[in-house]
């Protein structure tokens, strides 16, 4: 596939659903395209293509552009990647891709599509999406903690232990009741996270799972990123979240980390109170989330 050409005649190109047979070519345009945005890993791509909610712009067996949609959750999905070859006009081609993608998503019962690209690396895409009707939904804020003190150990009556594969179904169910559909994580994310190196614990009261926490290690353990703290709504307000946060910080201490980071929605004031009380401070970094309503 030649990714570099002066111009592409759109009259000779067609948009179609991507399939797993396109894996190699789609992977390449995500790596080498002149305009690129993607929020996925190489392991995610085959699953996205199998979902049947990704499209490509093709001309004479050459893929010139692609738009990748996520696996739907409760009538919501995410725009996970857009990439264009050199010589492809950005606005008309993105409009072509998304017109087909939106139609396919609507037929699958999806009602809301979200986009959370980093404006620093995908500054070319954000204004195009706004022109096409994507609306500002919220912002994701970044917090960090550099002193690893633990102001409170939280509820000591609950038991915590490392998550096991057998816990996956209960963790997924808990995640679904704790977060809005666009923010939930399914088994394709949580399953590998349980098995990978890092920190993943569940909190139990009796035989009932009442919460979980998940964090990842970076730079040899010097940076710990808190991906998730979740507490079952009926059990909130009983210092379970405090207990889980204390366990995360203790894990960071064991790794001799120098900083713990986390992301949270700007409207999640309740969670931000907990983070600030534990000594987390906003870094000033923020990510804009756009939404398209079908």
Image: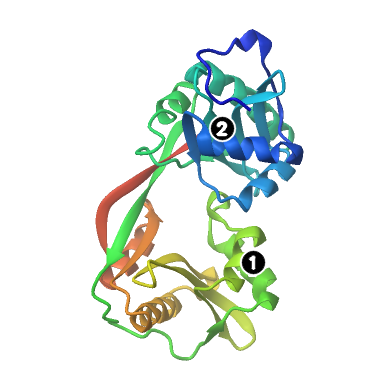
In the current view of this chain or complex, which residue is farthest to the bottom?
Answer: 157
Quarter where residue 10 is shown = top right
In the visual, does 2 lie left or right of 282? right
Residue at the image point whose x is 74% and y is 32% from the top: 107
Residue at the image point whose x is 62% and y is 66% from the top: 192
**SS class of the residue under badge 1?**
helix
Question: Can you identify the residue that label 2 sits on?
Answer: 293
Residue 219, compared with residue 286, is above or below; it is below
In the visual, does 270 lie left or right of 29? left
The mark that comes first in sequence, 1 or 2, is: 1
In the visual, does 217 lie left or right of 68? left
- In the rendered image, residue 213, in percent from the top left (x then y), is placed at 49, 72
- In the rendered image, residue 162, in percent from the top left (x then y), is placed at 56, 82
Q: Residues within 10 Å of mark 2 (few under 14, many from 20)?
A: some
Quarter where residue 131 is shown = top left
Q: Nearer the viewer, mark 1 or mark 2?
A: 1
Quarter of the figure with the C terminus = top right
Question: Can you identify the residue that label 1 sits on?
Answer: 191
């Amino acid at each position: 596939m030649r990714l570099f050409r002066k111009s592409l005649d759109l009259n000779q190109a067609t948009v179609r659903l991507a399939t797993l047979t396109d894996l190699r070519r789609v992977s390449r345009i995500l790596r080498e395209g002149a305009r690129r945005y993607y929020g996925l890993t190489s392991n995610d791509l085959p699953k996205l293509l199998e979902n049947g909610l990704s499209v490509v712009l093709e001309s004479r067996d050459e893929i010139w552009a692609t738009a990748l949609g996520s696996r739907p959750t409760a009538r919501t999905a995410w725009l996970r990647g857009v990439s264009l070859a050199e010589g492809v006009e950005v606005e008309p081609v993105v409009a072509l891709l998304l017109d087909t993608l939106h139609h396919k998503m609507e037929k699958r019962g999806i009602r809301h599509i979200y986009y959370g690209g980093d404006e620093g690396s995908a500054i070319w895409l954000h204004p195009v999406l706004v022109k096409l009707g994507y609306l500002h939904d919220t912002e994701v804020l970044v917090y960090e903690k550099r002193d690893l003190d633990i102001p409170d150990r939280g509820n000591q009556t609950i038991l915590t232990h490392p998550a096991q594969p057998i816990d996956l179904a209960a963790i997924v169910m808990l995640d679904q009741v704790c977060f809005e559909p666009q923010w939930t994580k399914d088994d394709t994310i949580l399953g590998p996270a349980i098995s990978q190196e890092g920190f993943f614990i569940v909190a139990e009261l009796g035989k009932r799972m009442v919460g979980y926490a998940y964090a990842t290690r970076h730079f040899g353990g010097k940076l710990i990123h808190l991906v998730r703290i979740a507490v079952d709504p009926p059990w909130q307000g009983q210092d379970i979240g405090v207990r889980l946060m204390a366990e995360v910080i203790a894990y960071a201490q064991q790794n001799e980390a120098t900083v713990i980071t986390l992301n949270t929605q700007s409207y999640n004031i309740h969670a931000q109170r907990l983070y600030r009380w534990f000594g987390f401070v906003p870094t000033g970094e923020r990510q804009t989330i756009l939404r398209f309503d079908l």
